[in-house]
Image: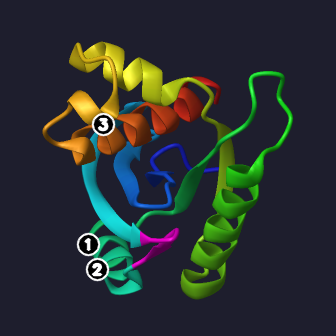
Amino acid sequence: MSTARTLLGFDFGMKNIGIAVGQELTATANPLTAIKARDGIPDWSQIEKLLKEWQPDLLIVGLPLNMDGTEQEMTAAAKRFGNRLNGRFNIPVEWQDERLTTYEALDQMGIRSKMDSRQRSDVDQLSAQLILQSWLNQQ
């Protein structure tokens, strides 16, 4: 296994999808962007553009779970999104538990809710970074 893979991390949401980029070599992740989604369906051409630009070897999709670890409605939607990423672009997808990443992102930004943020996309990007960073930390 190469230790210098480029990774993209995704914080899936029904309205916005946060995206982060990371490197296994440095084991660091950085917020990249957030794209709009309609009922969980992104503009696939925007994702394709990012994939061409960054040429990731692996995609990490946050898996929203209940606090007790059980699946919820959003878990299935995130899995569909990850499976579509894999099916469309033939890049391997791995899953990362994303419990509390939005709260952690809000805390880092010093705000109480996404509604307080002028730029909700900032929260989504930061959440994607936290998802990707937690995956890197576990490797």
State left or right for residue 79 relative to residue 19.
right
Query: In the rendered structure, which segment of residues is drawn in magenta?
Result: 38-42
In-front residue for pair 117/95: 117
Between 132 and 127, which is closer to the camera in this rendering? 127
Return the x and y of residue 75 as percentages of the image width and height: 72, 51
Residue 73 has which mark? Answer: none
Contact between marks 3 and 2 (CB within 8 A): the answer is no
Q: In the rendered image, which quarter is residue 99 located in?
A: top right
Q: Which mark is residue 123?
A: 3
Which residue has dot 1 on it?
Answer: 53
In the image, residue 22 above or below residue 98 = below
Judging by the rendered image, the residue that carries numbered circle 2 is: 49
Tell me how far mark 1 sits from mark 3, CA to CA: 23 Å
Q: Find residue 136 and report its image quarter.
A: top right
Residue 113's place in the image compared with 9, above or below, is above
- Between disc 3 and disc 2, the foreground one is 3
